[in-house]
Amino acid sequence: MSDVANASGAEEAAAHDELRVIEALRQGDEVTFARLVDQYHASLRRVALFYVSNRAVADEVVQDAWLGVIQGIWAFEGRSSLKTWVFRILINRAKTRAAREGRTMPFASFGADDIGAPEAAVSPDRFWPADHPTEPGHWTSPPRDFGASPEHRLLGREAGEHLQKAIDALPANQRLVLTLRDVEGCSTEEACNALGIQETNGRVLLHRARAKVRAALEPYLEGG
Amino acid sequence: MGSSTDMPCREFVELVTAYLDGALSSADRERCDAHWRNCPECRAYLAQMQLVVGSLGQLRRREVEENGAERDRLLDLFRTRGLHNRESRERSVPLGMAGEFAAPGDHISYFWESEHEFDAAAGFLAAGVERDEGCVLLGHDAANARLLAGLERRGLAPDELRRRDRLHTVSGEQPADAVLGAIGDRIRTAVDRGVPMVRVLGNLGWEHPGWPAEADILRLEARVTDAVRNLASVVMCAYDVRGLSGRSLLLGGLECHPLTLRRAALRHNEHHVPAAQFLETLALDAA
């Protein structure tokens, strides 16, 4: 009960804080704007590169997006979080630019049928078949415990490179959802909202992406 | 082993993302809860997954962010182009007519005489489409139809623009408050969806059947300037010099707009009267 009360209290405080940020931006508060830039600039650049061909173009797209934030803030009503809105503007500008460049882009014509063929999170041969007499669908080759303080291993430089390689190997749509959700820290709802896709479809892509990243790291982590 | 619950491990691993997102039905969530508590293998899987998600979140912090110069440039953009800067707004929005530029928040009256001049107003919309902005038509049917035909002549497809949410029509056949509200909503909704700006083109139906009386249209015009001053929008109202009454032209066209477009030049309009003063005079006239 008290957990719920605390959670909604924290949400309220965050919403209040966001209103203050919006108001400060409207009044031209440069410190607030600079903080926003520090918070999101690198992320916006990273996401822009999903859509356009090179860094110079990405920089233009990002600058355009910031201009959209600067000039749109008075009309922004907070139907979504400020963060989602900033990403949505960026994605819009990036799409327009990519279309102009004639590039194929993520979610170009993404509909409910476009999440692609089913993919298993874990290879089916690591489970007993469904008709197994005693343990249908249970692990034959289970994941092992990562052992004591696996975080340390995952946070090392080498593991970081493995992680990045695993992300880079993902199909573009999956990589984009995973980047917004897990790297940039949007909620699944926010990420899908910014991308203009259905939340259920976005979660399927996120699920596949995370499963692949885990699988790619598994041998590395268990070996340690 | 996990066989103590009725969920196979193979199903659990497929539900894990929705489970962590809190997106499962309560029945499925309880099945998942029960499963991992009884299944050490899936508990390990779940822990691995949480660890992976956690480390993805750390990736961002590793980056050494070198954006000092970039930051200064953006701050400069904020200073010069932000709409808090009311007095010296940079005219950076190509009007699409006469090679002129407007600033966001502008409310312009366009005095036209010839058919050629009327058709030029479609250029205002076309320039918006070119920049991926939204367009709103607030006009009587005949004017709207001609503008849409003008867009088609410029190689644009109004139906496709509507489908892409870049073209809307707002009815002027309603009270001033409702019109003002509808325009504001259109602008805010578009900006919320990430559209850079919205252009509104008015061809108000003075003395048209179904449209409000002259005084009501004037009350609307007087209030538009303040309503859009801080919004990412440019509003242009077309005034038919040969067809409209002198009073509509003077009070509506001149006194309600801070800027005029006439003879291929956008000019600051000294005849503009602040809304409060204008509305007060209008009320006295009526009394």
Image: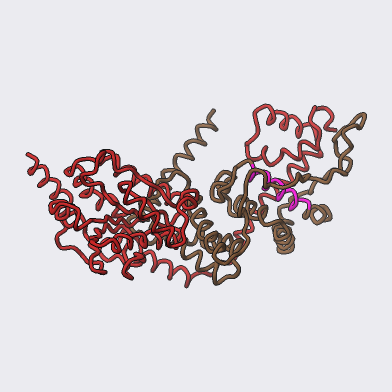
Chain colours: A brown, B red
- Residue B24 image point, x, y percent: 65, 33
A75 left or right of B258?
right
Give the residue at x 58% y 51%: A185
- Residue A191 image point, x, y percent: 57, 49
Identity of the residue furthest to the right in this view: A133
Asked whether residue B257 is drawn in magenta, I would say: no
Query: Which image quarter is the C terminus of chain B in?
Result: top left
* Region of the chain picked out in magenta, as a range: A201-215
Asked whether residue A202 is drawn in magenta, I would say: yes
Give the residue at x 68% y 27%: B27
- Residue B30 image point, x, y percent: 69, 28
Query: Which image quarter is the N terminus of chain B in?
Result: top right
Query: Which quadrant holds residue B80?
Result: bottom left
B233 left or right of A134?
left
Give the residue at x 54% y 28%: A1
Residue A26 seen in the current view: yes
- Residue A96 image point, x, y percent: 52, 60
Residue A82 seen in the current view: no
B287 left or right of B216?
left
Residue A126 sits above or below residue A133 on the image: below
Q: What predominant SS class does the magenta segment belong to? A: helix
A162 left or right of A189?
right
